[in-house]
Image (cartoon, coloured by chain):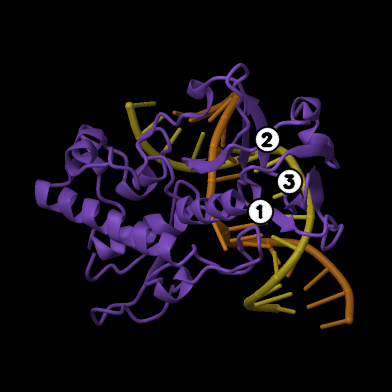
Chain colours: A purple, B yellow, C orange
Amino acid sequence: MPEIAEVETVARSLRRRLRGRRIRRVEIHDPKLARLDVARLRGRVVRDVFRAGKEIIIDLSTPRAPLWWGIHLRMTGAPHWSADGRPPTAVHLRLSAWFDRGALFYFDSRRFGVMRLCTAREEWEPTGVDPLSPAFTRERLAGLLRGSRTAIKPWLLRQDKLAGFGNIYASEVLYVARLNPRRAAGSLRPDEVDRLYRATRQVLTKAVECGGTTISDFADCDGACGGYQSYLKVYGRAGERCRRCPGTVRRIVQQGRSTFYCPDCQ
DNA sequence: ATTATATCCTGATCGC
DNA sequence: TGCGATCAGGATATAA
């Protein structure tokens, strides 16, 4: 279920646990992951773990042989660290990776998650701009928006434009920016682009600080839940009162996905 | 170029 | 308690 803040949170927790560790053995329990060549992982040492868009990248490179293990959690992927090397449960266990000490167990009930091995940086580097990176500036945002007639809410979900937005934060950011989700992306005036830019930085930075949003069961690899759910203003609040005007939060569907907003102040 | 729809899966929830 | 419909934090392919 993870978006940018949740993937960032998981990646950070994995970095703390895995950096410097050597992979002993990796076992796949789900045929859908069978294309991952686990033999290439054995013996590799984790140099770093980070996020690229919504993908977790485990850097296993050596000076002579670059190798990155990409893990995209999609809807329900969830890595769990185990100090004693035993899985907490066998339900939905899709992959096990044992290290010199401890083990990583990957769970995924819906089985949408994907894994891959990359040997070149270009394979995992997102085309879209990361909204948490210095490359994300209001000028850059304005340039990306220019000319697009797509509604701004679905536009925010376009990973080839901005890499990392998901359905929750798209609604939340538009609320903070006081922008109607149906507005054409390219129609935003400079002051509105500025509001969108600042709201994006503000919401996503806060969400990362909180360790992401836990609505049902999101957690980092140590089982710690996020805290941003208590800051959500509109997501999942259809029918409730708006927090800043007398209006009522509404749920609409755009491109097949829920959007939450206040029709009176956005 | 954009948009709608179906698809990949399973589980939780809601109305009857 | 059971049961079908609907929805879910993602992404992609295909049709319109």
- Cα distance between the residues tagged 2 and 1: 27 Å
Residue pointed to by mark 3? A111
Indicate the position of residue A99 as horizontal and vertical percent values: 77, 44
Quadrant location of the C terminus of chain A in the rendered image: bottom left
Residue at 23%, 60% in the rendered image: A177
Pick whichever of labels 1 and 3 is earlier in the sequence: 1
Q: Which secondary structure, mark 2?
A: loop
Quadrant location of the N terminus of chain A in the rendered image: bottom right
Pick whichever of labels 2 and 3 is earlier in the sequence: 2
Label 3: how many Cα within 10 Å (few below 14, some 14–19, many 20+): some
Indicate the position of residue A23 as horizontal and vertical percent values: 75, 38
Of the residues shown, which amino acid type is indicated by label 3? Arg
Q: Are marks 1 and 3 in contact (CB under 8 Å)?
A: yes
Label 2: how many Cα within 10 Å (few below 14, some 14–19, many 20+): many
Residue A76 - label:
1
Residue pointed to by mark 2? A45
Pick whichever of labels 2 and 1 is earlier in the sequence: 2
Of the residues shown, which amino acid type is indicated by label 2? Val
Residue A259 in sight: no
Residue at 57%, 54% in the rendered image: A10
Q: Which secondary structure, mark 1?
A: loop
Q: Are marks 2 and 3 on the same chain?
A: yes
Of the residues shown, which amino acid type is indicated by label 1? Thr
Q: Nearer the viewer, residue A77 or B11?
A: A77
Seen in the image, is A80 located left or right of residue A198?
right
Q: Does residue A241 sit above or below A4 in this rendering? A: below
- Cα distance between the residues tagged 1 and 3: 7 Å
Seen in the image, is B6 located left or right of residue A88?
left
Q: Nearer the viewer, residue B9 or A108?
A: A108
